[in-house]
Amino acid sequence: MASLTHARRSLVVWLRRAGGSADYLLVAAAALYLWRFSEWRVTDDDEGVYLLAGQRVMHGELPYVHFPFPQLPLTPYLYGAAQALLGRSMSAGRVLAWLMASLTLGLVFWVARKHSGRLAGAAALVLLVANPLCSLWLTPAKSLAPALFFAMAASAVTLDGTSNSRRAVGGALLGLSILCRATFLPLALPLAWFAASADGASGGRLRRAGIFASGLAGGCSPALLLAMISPGRFWFDNVTFHTLYPGGSRGWYYVRSALSELFGLGTLGSPYSIQNSLLAALVVGCVLGCSGLPAVARRYLGLGGIAALSAFIPVRPHAQYFVVALPFLAVGCAIALARSTKPLLAGATLLCIPTAISFSMSYAALDSPHRPAKEDEVAKAIDALAAGARVSSSQPSYLVASRSPRVRAADSQFTRIVGSRVSAVERERYQLLTDAELLSPADSEGRPEVFASGSLTSPQIYYGLQVGGWKQTKTVNGVLLWTRRSAPGRTDVQR
């Protein structure tokens, strides 16, 4: 009898260990899926801006002081560090974005499982990773992946924290999230309230909120320091810059366009519509249909709602910005439904899987030369033609892996767009540039000898290439490389 009891206990222990291993395998599988998708993901126009800014800060330059940067300053340092470790390349940026996204997946699984069990953890994970918003917008080297990881970590630490140190850490993590993307600032007030009203916490509410706020101030301190060093340019780059960007007068048009893309309203073939409509239905069902909604689920759903509203803060909201709400909503729905109606949760989760597989297979089948490894090949071809001379491009991603010196105007299409909308005095004051300076830099910069044209090349630049003594020298992965007629080069086509 004793041996039978011992065998049962051993079996229970083994099953628990196997279940824990299965948890890790599930998160690892989700991370592996994101890694494969990051290899398929077509290069985003913004990625080169972040990676070239990262190279500048690694050489000791400061955003807002030595070069314009229209966001808060942490992202360039993250992507600069990634390139310092892995080498200058588009792929280095993708590795960091994938790592941040994978950590977010792990946090989502852990939080949901902690509060409502393994089914809730698995459901929250699938609701997030199966959504095309996640795979499309957390894999590029942009600010979304790191900002979302820090925000999710801040929420997990703050909502589960009962000690002052955890509240301070939660505030610091939210500060890091805001340093990546200022639109996470609206989360500060509800998280401070949750920190102040935590069950079983010591000290008064005001004191607990103050500890969270001190951590938040510490996390945001690098931005505060840069604001003191260069207050005028800090304000211009983070606020005025966005009001000058084209489309500000058509804000409502972009809101309607983003919502239509998210839910397929009047849009045929939107990749997001099925998953987002399902998630929205689950959120509404949780709020209206779940009797006695758990407090933790209510809090995560509330944070998701605030994050979704914060996506409207930019002058031109796009569908991609709404990815910031997904982890919070997935966790809230999974916790609530796992405690009330598990069959519905399991059914909704299983419904996500075939649609995600179908989307991934169709996306992987796209025949596009604009993928990170292909962009790095363009950079190597540019260096071969330049032979140490200065280079330029309308597409920043073509120059990320390049070792050749480049003109400043090639760092960001955003500074050129806004530079064309302000006076010459303001351009000089805020170090803004125009398209014309891609080919004919001002000041003491040497003129470029090689130019790579892409989708961001304006008609003005094409005209300047045709009449300014340039010739088409080579085509690499569909990208035209131009050299000055005085520069050595040969004409061929490399596919």
Image (cartoon, rainbow, N blue to C red):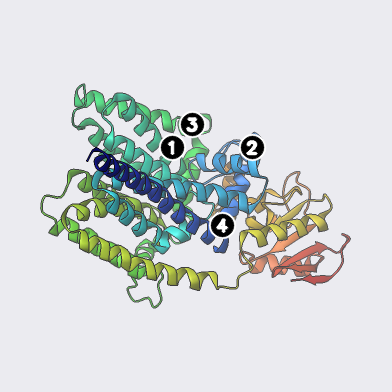
Choose the circle earlier in sequence order: 3 or 1: 1
Q: Residue 160's quadrant in the figure?
A: top left
Q: CA distance from mark 1 to mark 2?
A: 19 Å
Circle on res. 222:
3
**Residue placed farthest to the left in the image?**
291
Circle on res. 176:
1
Q: Between residues 33 and 182, which one lies in front from this camera angle?
A: 33
Q: Between residues 309 and 36, which one lies in front from this camera angle?
A: 36
Mark 1 vs mark 4, foreground winner is 1
Circle on res. 417:
4
Q: Quadrant of the C terminus?
A: bottom right
**In the image, 365: left or right of 17?**
right
Query: How busy is the neighbourhood of tag 4: few (under 14 within 10 Å), some, or many (20 plus)?
Result: some
Is label 4 in a helix, a strand or a loop?
helix
Choose the circle earlier in sequence order: 2 or 4: 2
Choose the circle earlier in sequence order: 2 or 3: 2
Q: CA distance from mark 2 to mark 4?
A: 26 Å
Mark 2: which amino acid? Met
Mark 4: which amino acid? Ile
Mark 1: which amino acid? Leu
Q: CA distance from mark 1 to mark 4?
A: 28 Å
Q: CA distance from mark 2 to mark 3?
A: 16 Å
Asked if the residue at tag 3 contacts the one at tag 2, i.e. Cβ–Cβ closer than 8 Å, the answer is no
Query: Residue shown at 49%/34% (left/top)?
Result: 231
Choose the circle earlier in sequence order: 1 or 4: 1
Name the residue beneath numbered marker 2: 58
Q: Residue 55's quadrant in the figure?
A: top right
Query: Residue shown at 49%/73% (left/top)?
Result: 362
Query: How busy is the neighbourhood of tag 1: few (under 14 within 10 Å), some, or many (20 plus)?
Result: many
Q: Between residues 408 and 233, which one lies in front from this camera angle?
A: 408
Mark 3: which amino acid? Pro
